[in-house]
Amino acid sequence: MHYQGHIIRPPSEANSIILQVTTGCSHNRCTFCGAYQGQRFQIKDSAIIEEDLDFAALHCTAQSTVFLADGDALVIPQKRLVTLCKQIRKRLPFVRRIHLYANCRDILARTETELAELKEAGLGRIYMGLESGHDKTLAAICKGATAAEMITAGQRVKKARIFLSITCLLGIAGIRYSLQHAVDTAEVLNQIGPNQIAILTLMLLDNTALGQAAAAGRFTMPDKLGLFQELRTLVAAIDVKKSQLQANHASNYFSLDGRLPRDKEIFLATIDQAIAGALDLKPETLRGL
């Protein structure tokens, strides 16, 4: 496979064929993200992608999912992306699902009909980074979208019957807006009703604007107790009909993994144990991205 730069994929794509169709991130301005710093964004040449498909056809026959990397493969023009999905299904007949990251802007650039066309061509899952439903926080981290736009984008994916996984980020609002961030994020999730909610914890990185602001004293992240209270506020306010909830990323101090609303009280009880200091937490040395 012709991989370039850092290959980032969701934890749930660990066993997928990682087909890199773009390099970097077309937005690449989020203040908390250092994944693609200094990396030029581009859509990879079709000939290279076809060579990687040939490799997968020979060597990846035990895998049933393709993840299209890097940061926002949905930026690929509609006609070309539909053709790519059809190529994957034709040349890799053992693949049942195609997944990708997408930012709000690229989803909103697609009509519901175009998303449905991608669904028909084989696109089965979209991972969208919400991070926060709090507008002041979204503006501060240069996310490039408002909460209302996030809701519109998420609802559009759901209407196209594509599985939607949404990422939320504990600590991203700092101490000042921590609990309001939790409440507003839950409200956005409630209006979208995603199939999956993934909760991560902010890791401050030296090569990011937010990490540098923290080092200079301009941004203060909640401490452990504050993060747990933020998580409890978020989970308590989520009211969706049916969704997976996973807070089992390496960045988190402890794991939650189950379904909403079925397991909500179990989640809250576990968080309460953490708040009370009665839960074993992951050591700092084992936390990471």
Image (cartoon, rainbow, N blue to C red):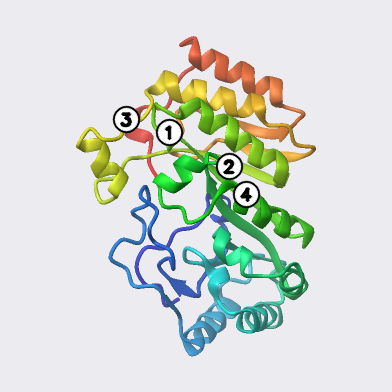
N-terminal-most mark, 1 or 3 = 1
* Residues at circles 1 and 4 in contact by the CB criterion of under 8 Å: no
**Residue picked out by circle 1:** 171
Q: Which amino acid does label 3 sit on?
A: Thr
* Residues at circles 1 and 3 in contact by the CB criterion of under 8 Å: no
The answer to whether residue 63 is visible is: no
Secondary element type, mark 1: loop
The residue mark sitting in front, 4 or 3, is 4
Q: Residue at x 51, y 42 (%)?
A: 135
Q: Residue 4: where, in percent of width, then height?
A: 37, 72
Q: Residue 233: where, in percent of width, then height?
A: 58, 24
Q: Nearer the viewer, residue 36 or 185?
A: 185
N-terminal-most mark, 2 or 4 = 4
Q: Nearer the viewer, residue 204 or 256?
A: 204
Spatial CA distance of label 1 from label 2 is 14 Å
**Residue picked out by circle 4:** 148
Number of the label disc, if any, that sits on residue 198:
2
Q: In this view, does 83 lie to the left or right of 50?
A: right
Q: Residue at x 43, y 38 (%)?
A: 172
* Residues at circles 4 and 3 in contact by the CB criterion of under 8 Å: no
**Mark 4 crowdedness (10 Å alpha carbons): few <14, some 14-19, many ≥20:** few
Spatial CA distance of label 1 from label 3 is 9 Å
**Residue picked out by circle 3:** 220
Secondary element type, mark 3: loop
- In terms of image quadrants, where is residue 211? top left
Spatial CA distance of label 2 from label 4 is 20 Å
Vertical arrangement, residue 129 with respect to residue 251, above or below:
below
* Residues at circles 2 and 4 in contact by the CB criterion of under 8 Å: no
Q: Residue 107: where, in percent of width, then height?
A: 62, 64
